[in-house]
């Protein structure tokens, strides 16, 4: 059976494993003696295939200890949540809580309410809640969550996953009302993929973010990266250039930001002007060290949008990590991205680069239009399904990589590039011999 309690082994602590079996009574007495006098740092519970009465037998033992981190995942029913709420309430040393109850049809708002009651007024600093595909999570349940969030005055990091929960503007406003009270927050991650997001929701996000003046990290997913062809998302993803302007205004107020990760894949109402509106906010983030933007599957993006991104990269002098996604943006070519690539090359502090041009069929990789900064330590490049890229383009890429003397990690994907030959791949690998400091290499040329 799986162990129900995990405590990291250190000089002052030992790993204690409590197995659930038919021999509960003697084993329970043994466990109580074994862990007496130790402080538990972490509890991990997974009662997925356990009966409630077995969980109850181990529960009194757990309740005697004050864990700093609790990870609750794959819960079966409301009764489990009730018992785990008791555990959370008893752990006054609790600083980190992770709850994963995705895709459960037999958990209701009543069960979740037990969790919300238990965390109110707690001193939790890191909170992760995964509600993916919980279709019942509607107005009442979200309001209860909002009320619980308002009471977490010590919270510094929050991760909320509402992917495919079908939340609308009304529910998301409730979430925002809870978040904007968390003035001590340093990091926020919101997964709103396949929720009903429009420009009104961007205004709600602005009202939330403008109060979080100490925020350092922000990661927001506005749309999904998969299932894009299975159903029409046009009624969901209505973020336009107006919404991008609102988000840009919010970013201007967050002077402490060090990391920004925004995913707009499949948001097809965004144009070059929307990118420019967002960049107007990004240029005020002088302390930014990591920037990731994904505009995948958007046919509206052309050279003007890429040039504006390049201008921002030049102004962010502290930037160390950059990720740009243009998967399936069919209007992007070597010429349209040339100025942006030049701005990336001229950035002297950049150490990590992740570029996704998957499905950009006009990309060939002309040598004079594709170059990389010499300061890079890690590179991830995706040219899969760039069907016009030939051996010459791959060779040009090899020349650019060979000039990076301190590269430690390289990942290159060229699957579906049918015009690349075996000889072209062999010639490319010869350039890799110059990468003396390389520690990690991932090459994918499935043609």
Image (spheres, helix red, strand yellow):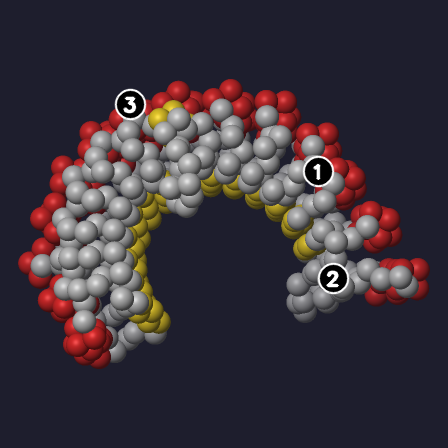
Residue 64 percent location from the top left of the image = 82, 50
Q: CA distance from mark 3 to mark 1?
A: 40 Å
Residue 234 percent location from the top left of the image = 36, 29
Q: Residue at x 25, y 51 (%)?
A: 359
Secondary structure beneath dot 3 equals: helix
Residue 387 percent location from the top left of the image = 19, 57
Q: Nearer the viewer, residue 442 or 164?
A: 164
Q: Residue at x 14, y 64 (%)?
A: 390
Question: Which disc is residue 230 wearing?
Answer: none
Q: Is residue 206 above or below residue 349?
A: above
User: Which one is in front in this view, the residue at disc 3 or the one at disc 1?
Assistant: 1
Which residue, as the protein is rendered here, is positioned at the far left? 368
Sequence-earlier tag: 1 or 2: 2
| Pointers 3 and 2 in contact (C-beta within 8 Å) | no
Left or right: where 215 falls relative to 343: right
**Where is mark 3, residue-wise?**
242
Local packing at callout 3 (Cα closer than 10 Å; few below 14, some 14-19, many 20+) is many
Q: Residue at x 74, y 62 (%)?
A: 3
Secondary structure beneath dot 1 equals: loop
Local packing at callout 2 (Cα closer than 10 Å; few below 14, some 14-19, many 20+) is few
Sequence-earlier tag: 3 or 1: 1
**Where is mark 1, residue-wise?**
106
Marks counted in the figure total: 3
**Where is mark 2, residue-wise?**
3
Which image quarter is the N terminus in?
Answer: bottom right
Left or right: where 445 falls relative to 214: left
Residue 83 visible in the current orientation: yes
């Amino acid at each position: 059976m799986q162990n129900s309690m995990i405590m990291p082994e250190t000089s002052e602590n030992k790993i204690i494993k409590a197995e659930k079996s038919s021999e509960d009574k003697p084993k329970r007495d043994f466990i109580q003696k074994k862990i007496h006098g130790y402080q538990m740092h972490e509890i991990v519970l997974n009662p997925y295939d356990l009966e409630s009465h077995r969980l109850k037998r181990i529960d009194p033992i757990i309740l005697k200890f004050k864990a700093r981190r609790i990870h609750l995942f794959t819960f079966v029913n409301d009764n489990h949540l009730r018992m785990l709420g008791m555990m959370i309430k008893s752990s006054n040393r609790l600083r980190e809580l992770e709850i994963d109850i995705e895709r459960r049809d037999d958990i209701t708002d009543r069960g979740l309410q037990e969790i919300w009651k238990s965390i109110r007024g707690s001193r939790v600093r890191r909170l992760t809640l995964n509600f993916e595909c919980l279709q019942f999570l509607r107005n009442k349940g979200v309001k209860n969550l909002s009320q619980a969030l308002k009471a977490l005055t010590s919270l510094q990091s929050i991760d909320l996953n509402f992917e495919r929960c079908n939340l609308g503007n009304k529910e998301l406003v409730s979430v925002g009302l809870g978040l904007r009270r968390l003035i001590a927050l340093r990091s926020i991650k919101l997964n709103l993929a396949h929720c009903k997001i429009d420009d009104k929701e961007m205004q709600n996000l602005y009202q939330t973010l403008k109060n979080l003046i100490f925020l350092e990290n922000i990661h927001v997913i506005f749309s999904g990266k998969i299932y894009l062809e299975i159903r029409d998302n046009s009624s969901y993803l209505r973020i336009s250039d107006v919404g991008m302007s609102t988000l840009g205004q919010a970013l201007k107020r967050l002077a402490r930001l060090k990391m920004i990760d925004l995913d707009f894949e499949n948001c097809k109402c965004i144009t070059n002007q929307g990118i420019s509106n967002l960049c107007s906010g990004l240029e005020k983030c002088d302390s930014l060290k990591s920037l990731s933007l994904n505009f995948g599957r958007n046919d509206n993006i052309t050279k003007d949008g890429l040039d504006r991104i390049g201008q921002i990269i030049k102004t962010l002098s502290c930037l160390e990590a950059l990720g740009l996604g243009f998967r399936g943006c069919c209007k992007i070519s070597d010429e349209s991205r040339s100025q942006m690539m030049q701005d990336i090359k001229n950035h002297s502090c950049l150490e990590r680069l992740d570029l996704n041009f998957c499905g950009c069929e006009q990309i060939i990789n002309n040598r004079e239009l594709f170059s990389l900064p010499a300061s890079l330590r890690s590179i991830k490049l995706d040219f899969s399904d760039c069907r016009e890229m030939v051996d010459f383009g791959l060779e040009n890429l090899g020349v650019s990589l060979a000039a990076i003397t301190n590269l430690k990690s390289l990942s290159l994907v060229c699957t579906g590039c049918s015009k690349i030959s075996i000889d072209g791949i062999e010639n490319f690998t010869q350039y890799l011999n110059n990468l003396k400091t390389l520690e990690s290499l991932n090459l994918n040329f499935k043609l």
